[in-house]
Image (cartoon, grey):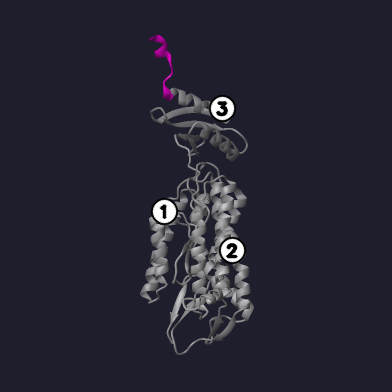
Amino acid sequence: MENQLLEPLPEQVTLDRLREALDGLMDITSVRVLSAGTEPTVEFGGIVRGDDVDVTFDEILARFELLGYTPVLTRPEEEYLLQAVPLVIDKRTGKPWVNALLFVLTALSVLLIGALNEGANPLEDLSSLWVGFPFAATLLGILAAHEFSHYFVGRRYGSPVSLPYFIPLPLSLLGTMGALIVQRGPMRSRKALFDIGAAGPLGGLVLAIPLLAVGLMLSEVQPLPTDQSYYMEGNSLLYFTLKWLIFRQALPAGGVDVMLHPIAFAAWASLMITALNLFPVGQFDGGHITYALWGRKAWTVARIFVFLMYGWGFVLNLMGNSAGWTWLIWGFLGSMMGARHPAPLNDATSVGPVRTAIGWGIVALFILILVPIPLIIVTP
């Protein structure tokens, strides 16, 4: 009976194993059991060792995973707080055949819209579907560059990110709602959050801006219709400047505008989508970047921008411009995501001066590519 009484309780065994896992990585000054049981949630206070806390945290993460635990690091004051949570992130990333099927369906959908925009009718002559190839290749190429930039940087950090899911939307303006990857667990650190969030927009823009310039060079300035209603794409600062540099005039003006080549229209649309995705809200790319830079202050920024999206959407609708629905829909998506971007596992270290400078550069890019009024219906 005495030997049984002296045996350590299961909770104490787990505490000892967690302490051992932190040996050499953290000087522990306090231990608090947040939830009791055979797999308790434990909070350790103390000082994280090493010159680079991110590197030390990665080692803690690897050791805790062997015990069926995940660490969460914060630094509310001088000391660090490390919570040991009894779970291991599921790193399965979906079934690739689903991604492949959605891509094929999206490619067909975008090809159809590209062909219809050029006056062909693939529903009657299937071979005319290839008329939409310049539009489809441009749009899908930029979307793929955007999403695979997220994917490869995510995999470099060991994040459980899925392959891109392309979303077909036949008979819409573009034939697609874009693409997304699924992150099946929290980000590792603020640096990982920043790099993964910024990789997509930067990877897409590297392709989109040159293609927009090429597409504009293939386009022509023509008189605007005077006998029928038509859609006119909105200007961003970048788009307006490129048109001025290529055509040596401000457009639209004087009853003329540029008749966009399919490559130019696809690149313009991708830039507009990128700008919408850079809004600093929720799980948008901009939401990832702002939380990585400013932490919980990003929650206030997100609330302000959701309010601005709703406000601008209502203003445009009151002016009779149906483009207001774009802003209302994105405002609704931002509301559904919530202002509180989830924290990464290591929320204790900053991104550093280099990433901060790149972040402000992305803010400047956002201002340059933002299209306040995406589409205008002009009635002569």
Mark 1–mark 3 Cα distance, whole angstroms, equals 37 Å
Task: Measure how far apart labels 1 and 2 are at the Cα level.
Answer: 26 Å
Q: Answer few, some or many: residues within 10 Å of disc 1's Cα (few below 14, many 20 plus, some between 14 and 19).
A: many
Nearest the camera: 350 or 108? 108
Tell me the residue that label 3 is attached to.
23
Q: Are marks 2 and 3 in contact (CB under 8 Å)?
A: no
Query: Residue 342 in magenta?
Result: no
The residue range painted magenta reads 1-11
- From this viewpoint, is residue 370 visible? no
Lower position in the chain sequence, tag 2 or tag 3: 3
Mark 2, other Cα within 10 Å: few <14 / some 14–19 / many ≥20: many
**In magenta stretch: residue 6:** yes
**Of callouts 1 and 3, which one flags the residue occurring earlier in the amino acid sequence?**
3
Q: Which mark is residue 372?
A: none
Q: Nearer the viewer, mark 1 or mark 2?
A: 2
Main secondary structure found in the magenta portion:
helix
Residue, disc 2:
205
Q: Is residue 212 left or right of residue 37?
A: right
Residue for point 56% across, 37% down: 57
Quadrant position of the C terminus in the picture: bottom left
